Amino acid sequence: MESITGDGYAYGYRKLTVLLRREHDLIINKKKVYRLCTELDILRPQRQKRTHYPRKLARNRNITNSNQLFETDIKYGYIVGEDRFFFIQTVLDVYDRVAVAYHIGLTCEGKDVARTLQQALWKRQLFEDDPKPVIRSDNGPQFISHAFQEACESFKVEHERIPPRTPNMNAHIESFHRLLEDDCLSRHEFETYKEAYEVVTEYMKFYNERRIHSSIRDLAPAEFYRQNQVSPIPIKAVRV
Protein backbone atom coordinates (compact mmCIF):
# COMPACT_ATOMS: atom_id res chain seq x y z
CA MET A 1 0.00 0.00 0.00
CA GLU A 2 2.76 2.43 0.91
CA SER A 3 4.54 1.87 -2.41
CA ILE A 4 1.34 2.75 -4.25
CA THR A 5 0.41 5.91 -2.30
CA GLY A 6 3.95 7.11 -1.80
CA ASP A 7 3.08 8.90 1.43
CA GLY A 8 2.66 6.04 3.86
CA TYR A 9 -1.01 6.78 4.62
CA ALA A 10 -3.75 4.24 4.08
CA TYR A 11 -6.65 4.77 1.67
CA GLY A 12 -9.95 2.97 1.29
CA TYR A 13 -10.50 1.07 -1.94
CA ARG A 14 -12.54 3.88 -3.52
CA LYS A 15 -9.85 6.53 -3.02
CA LEU A 16 -7.20 4.01 -3.99
CA THR A 17 -9.01 3.53 -7.31
CA VAL A 18 -8.88 7.29 -7.94
CA LEU A 19 -5.18 7.34 -7.08
CA LEU A 20 -4.33 4.45 -9.41
CA ARG A 21 -6.11 6.15 -12.28
CA ARG A 22 -4.63 9.57 -11.60
CA GLU A 23 -1.05 8.73 -10.67
CA HIS A 24 -0.46 5.53 -12.64
CA ASP A 25 -2.80 5.95 -15.64
CA LEU A 26 -4.41 2.56 -14.97
CA ILE A 27 -7.80 1.67 -16.39
CA ILE A 28 -9.38 0.00 -13.39
CA ASN A 29 -12.69 0.17 -11.57
CA LYS A 30 -13.35 0.18 -7.85
CA LYS A 31 -14.82 -3.35 -7.85
CA LYS A 32 -11.55 -4.79 -9.13
CA VAL A 33 -9.54 -2.71 -6.64
CA TYR A 34 -11.79 -3.98 -3.84
CA ARG A 35 -11.26 -7.60 -4.99
CA LEU A 36 -7.47 -7.16 -5.19
CA CYS A 37 -7.31 -5.51 -1.79
CA THR A 38 -9.36 -8.38 -0.34
CA GLU A 39 -7.01 -10.97 -1.84
CA LEU A 40 -3.98 -9.08 -0.49
CA ASP A 41 -5.68 -8.62 2.89
CA ILE A 42 -4.94 -4.89 2.93
CA LEU A 43 -8.47 -3.51 3.34
CA ARG A 44 -8.92 -1.12 6.23
CA PRO A 45 -11.19 -2.44 9.02
CA GLN A 46 -14.82 -1.61 8.31
CA ARG A 47 -16.94 0.18 10.88
CA GLN A 48 -19.62 -2.05 12.32
CA LYS A 49 -23.12 -0.89 11.52
CA ARG A 50 -24.96 -0.35 14.77
CA THR A 51 -28.48 -1.64 15.18
CA HIS A 52 -31.12 1.09 15.33
CA TYR A 53 -33.86 0.58 17.90
CA PRO A 54 -37.06 2.51 17.16
CA ARG A 55 -38.26 4.76 19.95
CA LYS A 56 -41.52 3.68 21.61
CA LEU A 57 -43.42 6.53 23.25
CA ALA A 58 -45.09 5.88 26.59
CA ARG A 59 -48.86 5.51 26.34
CA ASN A 60 -51.65 5.71 28.89
CA ARG A 61 -51.98 2.49 30.86
CA ASN A 62 -54.31 1.06 33.48
CA ILE A 63 -52.20 -1.00 35.90
CA THR A 64 -54.16 -3.60 37.89
CA ASN A 65 -51.43 -5.74 39.45
CA SER A 66 -47.74 -6.03 40.22
CA ASN A 67 -45.20 -6.76 37.48
CA GLN A 68 -47.12 -4.93 34.77
CA LEU A 69 -45.20 -1.63 34.64
CA PHE A 70 -41.79 -0.71 36.04
CA GLU A 71 -40.57 2.90 36.07
CA THR A 72 -36.88 3.74 36.26
CA ASP A 73 -34.82 6.88 36.61
CA ILE A 74 -31.54 8.16 38.05
CA LYS A 75 -31.01 10.34 41.14
CA TYR A 76 -27.78 12.20 41.96
CA GLY A 77 -26.25 12.45 45.42
CA TYR A 78 -23.26 14.48 46.58
CA ILE A 79 -20.25 13.36 48.64
CA VAL A 80 -18.96 16.42 50.48
CA GLY A 81 -15.76 14.81 51.74
CA GLU A 82 -14.70 13.72 48.24
CA ASP A 83 -16.28 16.63 46.32
CA ARG A 84 -17.99 14.41 43.77
CA PHE A 85 -21.39 13.05 42.86
CA PHE A 86 -22.71 9.51 42.96
CA PHE A 87 -25.65 7.92 41.18
CA ILE A 88 -28.71 6.00 42.33
CA GLN A 89 -30.78 4.24 39.66
CA THR A 90 -33.94 2.50 40.78
CA VAL A 91 -36.48 0.20 39.13
CA LEU A 92 -39.86 0.76 40.81
CA ASP A 93 -43.05 -1.28 40.41
CA VAL A 94 -45.81 1.35 40.05
CA TYR A 95 -48.54 -0.89 41.50
CA ASP A 96 -46.99 -2.11 44.75
CA ARG A 97 -44.38 0.72 45.01
CA VAL A 98 -41.51 -1.67 45.71
CA ALA A 99 -38.03 -0.50 44.74
CA VAL A 100 -37.44 -3.84 43.08
CA ALA A 101 -33.77 -3.29 42.22
CA TYR A 102 -31.29 -0.45 42.33
CA HIS A 103 -27.78 0.58 41.38
CA ILE A 104 -25.56 2.80 43.53
CA GLY A 105 -22.25 3.86 42.01
CA LEU A 106 -19.80 6.60 41.15
CA THR A 107 -20.78 6.07 37.52
CA CYS A 108 -24.01 5.02 35.86
CA GLU A 109 -23.83 3.85 32.25
CA GLY A 110 -25.99 1.85 29.90
CA LYS A 111 -24.50 -1.40 31.11
CA ASP A 112 -25.36 -0.49 34.71
CA VAL A 113 -29.03 0.27 34.04
CA ALA A 114 -29.24 -2.93 32.00
CA ARG A 115 -27.88 -4.89 34.96
CA THR A 116 -30.42 -3.28 37.31
CA LEU A 117 -33.27 -4.33 35.01
CA GLN A 118 -31.85 -7.85 34.95
CA GLN A 119 -31.76 -7.88 38.77
CA ALA A 120 -35.39 -6.70 38.93
CA LEU A 121 -36.54 -9.51 36.65
CA TRP A 122 -34.53 -12.03 38.64
CA LYS A 123 -35.87 -10.86 42.01
CA ARG A 124 -39.45 -11.10 40.77
CA GLN A 125 -38.71 -14.45 39.03
CA LEU A 126 -40.02 -13.11 35.72
CA PHE A 127 -37.49 -14.44 33.22
CA GLU A 128 -39.82 -17.26 32.18
CA ASP A 129 -42.99 -15.16 32.26
CA ASP A 130 -44.72 -13.78 29.19
CA PRO A 131 -45.58 -11.00 28.90
CA LYS A 132 -42.97 -9.36 31.09
CA PRO A 133 -43.33 -5.92 32.68
CA VAL A 134 -43.03 -2.85 30.50
CA ILE A 135 -40.09 -0.67 31.57
CA ARG A 136 -40.69 3.09 31.33
CA SER A 137 -37.94 5.71 31.43
CA ASP A 138 -37.11 9.22 30.34
CA ASN A 139 -34.72 9.97 27.48
CA GLY A 140 -31.50 10.05 29.48
CA PRO A 141 -28.35 8.83 27.72
CA GLN A 142 -28.22 5.64 29.77
CA PHE A 143 -31.72 4.65 28.67
CA ILE A 144 -31.25 5.38 24.98
CA SER A 145 -27.88 3.58 24.95
CA HIS A 146 -27.33 0.50 22.81
CA ALA A 147 -26.37 -1.48 25.93
CA PHE A 148 -29.79 -0.90 27.51
CA GLN A 149 -31.73 -1.38 24.28
CA GLU A 150 -29.92 -4.63 23.58
CA ALA A 151 -30.66 -5.81 27.12
CA CYS A 152 -34.38 -5.08 26.68
CA GLU A 153 -34.34 -7.02 23.41
CA SER A 154 -32.51 -9.92 25.06
CA PHE A 155 -34.87 -10.00 28.08
CA LYS A 156 -37.93 -9.57 25.80
CA VAL A 157 -38.98 -6.50 27.79
CA GLU A 158 -40.84 -3.65 26.10
CA HIS A 159 -39.11 -0.33 26.75
CA GLU A 160 -41.11 2.86 26.42
CA ARG A 161 -39.84 6.42 26.86
CA ILE A 162 -41.81 9.42 28.01
CA PRO A 163 -41.93 12.48 25.73
CA PRO A 164 -39.55 15.33 26.67
CA ARG A 165 -40.73 17.60 29.50
CA THR A 166 -43.44 15.22 30.73
CA PRO A 167 -42.18 14.02 34.15
CA ASN A 168 -45.82 13.37 35.16
CA MET A 169 -45.67 10.27 32.96
CA ASN A 170 -42.94 8.95 35.25
CA ALA A 171 -44.71 10.21 38.36
CA HIS A 172 -44.13 7.23 40.67
CA ILE A 173 -40.37 7.14 40.33
CA GLU A 174 -40.30 10.94 40.61
CA SER A 175 -42.29 10.67 43.85
CA PHE A 176 -39.90 8.01 45.13
CA HIS A 177 -36.95 10.29 44.39
CA ARG A 178 -38.56 13.10 46.41
CA LEU A 179 -38.85 10.72 49.36
CA LEU A 180 -35.25 9.62 48.87
CA GLU A 181 -34.12 13.25 48.88
CA ASP A 182 -36.24 14.36 51.86
CA ASP A 183 -35.88 11.28 54.05
CA CYS A 184 -32.28 10.36 53.27
CA LEU A 185 -29.98 12.46 51.09
CA SER A 186 -30.81 15.89 52.55
CA ARG A 187 -30.24 14.61 56.09
CA HIS A 188 -26.62 13.59 55.58
CA GLU A 189 -23.33 15.15 54.60
CA PHE A 190 -21.45 12.18 53.25
CA GLU A 191 -17.71 12.14 53.81
CA THR A 192 -16.95 9.07 51.71
CA TYR A 193 -18.55 7.00 48.98
CA LYS A 194 -18.58 4.04 51.38
CA GLU A 195 -20.69 6.04 53.84
CA ALA A 196 -23.08 7.16 51.08
CA TYR A 197 -23.48 3.60 49.82
CA GLU A 198 -24.25 2.23 53.28
CA VAL A 199 -26.74 4.98 54.16
CA VAL A 200 -28.65 4.73 50.87
CA THR A 201 -28.71 0.94 51.04
CA GLU A 202 -30.14 1.11 54.55
CA TYR A 203 -32.78 3.61 53.38
CA MET A 204 -33.81 1.28 50.53
CA LYS A 205 -34.41 -1.48 53.07
CA PHE A 206 -36.41 0.88 55.28
CA TYR A 207 -38.48 2.13 52.34
CA ASN A 208 -39.37 -1.36 51.11
CA GLU A 209 -39.93 -3.05 54.45
CA ARG A 210 -41.20 -0.38 56.87
CA ARG A 211 -42.32 2.87 55.21
CA ILE A 212 -46.11 2.76 54.91
CA HIS A 213 -48.06 4.09 51.90
CA SER A 214 -51.67 5.21 52.05
CA SER A 215 -52.27 4.10 48.44
CA ILE A 216 -51.55 0.47 49.35
CA ARG A 217 -53.69 0.23 52.49
CA ASP A 218 -51.10 1.75 54.81
CA LEU A 219 -48.73 -1.13 54.26
CA ALA A 220 -45.05 -1.07 53.41
CA PRO A 221 -44.39 -1.88 49.73
CA ALA A 222 -42.75 -5.28 50.28
CA GLU A 223 -45.43 -6.30 52.79
CA PHE A 224 -48.20 -5.32 50.39
CA TYR A 225 -46.53 -7.24 47.55
CA ARG A 226 -46.18 -10.42 49.62
CA GLN A 227 -49.74 -10.33 50.93
CA ASN A 228 -51.21 -9.45 47.54
CA GLN A 229 -49.49 -12.45 45.97
CA VAL A 230 -51.19 -14.78 48.47
CA SER A 231 -54.62 -13.14 48.62
CA PRO A 232 -55.45 -10.15 46.38
CA ILE A 233 -55.84 -6.88 48.27
CA PRO A 234 -58.29 -4.57 46.48
CA ILE A 235 -56.90 -1.14 45.72
CA LYS A 236 -57.58 1.35 42.96
CA ALA A 237 -56.04 0.64 39.59
CA VAL A 238 -53.06 2.84 38.82
CA ARG A 239 -53.58 5.06 35.79
CA VAL A 240 -50.35 6.29 34.22
Image (tube, grey):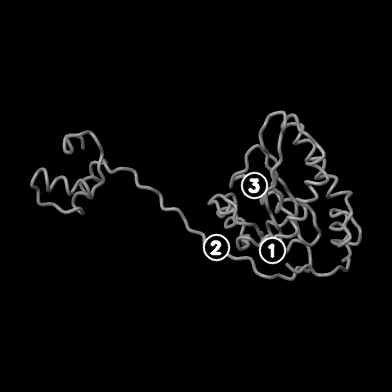
Q: Provide the residue designation for mark 1.
A: 169
Q: Residue furthest left?
A: 25
Q: Provide the residue designation for mark 2.
A: 55
Question: What residue lies at 85% left-to-right and 45% top-to-bottom?
Answer: 206
Report, in whole angstroms, how far the alpha carbon at label 3 lies from the one at label 2.
21 Å
Question: What residue lies at 87% left-to-right and 49% top-to-bottom?
Answer: 209
Left or right? Give the position of 146 relative to 131. left
Q: Quadrant of the N terminus?
A: top left
Q: Secondary structure at mark 3?
A: helix
Q: Position of residue 144 (x, y in %)?
A: 56, 54
Report, in whole angstroms, how far the alpha carbon at label 1 lies from the one at label 3.
23 Å
Question: What residue lies at 83% left-to-right and 45% top-to-bottom?
Answer: 183
Looking at numbered disc 2 in the image, what kind of residue is underneath it?
Arg
Report, in whole angstroms, how far the alpha carbon at label 2 lies from the one at label 1.
16 Å
Mark 1 nearby-residue class (10 Å; few <14, some 14–19, many ≥20): many
Q: Provide the residue designation for mark 3.
A: 115
Question: What residue lies at 57% left-to-right and 58% top-to-bottom?
Answer: 153
